[in-house]
Image (cartoon, grey):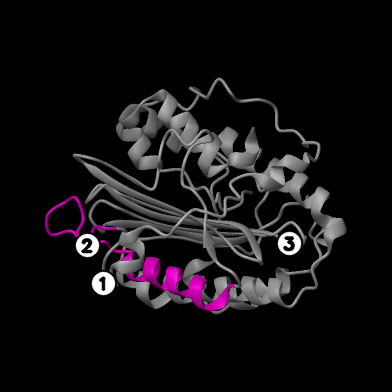
Amino acid sequence: KSSILLVLPLLKLCNAFSIPRQQLSRRKTATRVLAFRPELLETWQLDKVSFPSWLTSHESKLSIGPWNTSVSPNQRLVFAEFWNWHLDFLESNLSNLRPLPATNRDNSIDFSLVQDEKSHMVNLCFRSDEYRKIRMSHFDGGKQIQVLQALWYPDPKYNLPVLGIEMAQFGGGTGHMMASDFQPIHDSESDHAVLYTPLIKKIREKYPLLQGRMSDRYYDYTHFNDFMLFSRFDDERYIDTDVVPAVKEYTRAHVNMIQELKPDDTAIPKVMERQAAFDTYFAERDQAIHMFKAKFGKQWAEDFVYDFLFELSR
């Protein structure tokens, strides 16, 4: 089994660099339950971070970040409309939304906009009264690959699963993969504040195309739900007819669940401990780090994974 990654690896792109699976980061350690550290609550909680001008000023729903075209000529940004819906949904439905820095731990590297001759990447991070961290990432490798990811970590006053979203297109539209899940932070659903499987099962039943199973090559089903949305498909039209509507339903359901739950300050230590274990699990198994090492260098890649993507992993 496995959870959405949600970090589903960029398998084909990693393979293009011919990087062996066994080349794991030297920071890899055995998955462990981390002791609660109060300072974790302060991680990335800066109040003076401003929204970037390119995020607040652009109006095109076909843009991602400052870019309105792909790095490949005549290749559209296939996930742009969902990306912008996602931003609008955050603003319209969450309380006290504010940006967090998209940087490494000492703020020496800014990950918000990254580009080279063959790719663009946008990374955004937010928090609200309901969510400790919401991370959005989009990688545009043109016709070779486009990937959208988002992870929503509930504020630790809410003992709830993490919302994971991933969409990927390969080969200029010849192959696609998607996943979305309420990713458990505990081994048992009953250890969460709400039994959420009936909710997502009901949504999943409406979309037969999205009832696939994820491979266990990189992940077991730790931090994944049996009723996650998952699919591999060829026809790009399914993005609009099935993928986007289903993921929007999962997103709304997660926000409704958290907003209907009474916050519990006594849950904070345990939830932070389990979110740290969640980050550690995925940081240790992240396959995209190999691609980023090849493109941007070892230090950049390790800081991106361990300081930004999964900052509670160390």
Task: Find the distance from the CA under tag 1 to the CA under tag 2.
Answer: 8 Å
Whichever of callouts 1 and 3 sits on the residue coming sooner in the sequence is 1
The percent position of residue 37, horizontal first and vertical second, equals 77, 39
Whichever of callouts 1 and 2 sits on the residue coming sooner in the sequence is 1
**Up/down of 75 relative to 89, above or below:** above
* 277 vs 100, nearest the viewer: 100
Q: Label 3, on which residue?
A: 160
Whichever of callouts 2 and 3 sits on the residue coming sooner in the sequence is 2
Q: Label 1, on which residue?
A: 60
Q: Secondary structure at mark 2?
A: loop
Query: In this view of the protein, can residue 286 be seen by the observer?
Result: no
Q: Which contiguous range is marked in magenta?
A: 66-94
Indicate the quadrant containing the C terminus: top left, top right, bottom left or bottom right.
top right
* 296 vs 203, nearest the viewer: 296
In the orientation shown, which residue stands out farthest toward the right?
266
Q: Is residue 6 left or right of residue 263?
A: left
Q: Label 2, on which residue?
A: 68
The percent position of residue 152, horizontal first and vertical second, equals 58, 59
Type of the residue with mark 3: Leu
Q: Secondary structure at mark 3?
A: loop
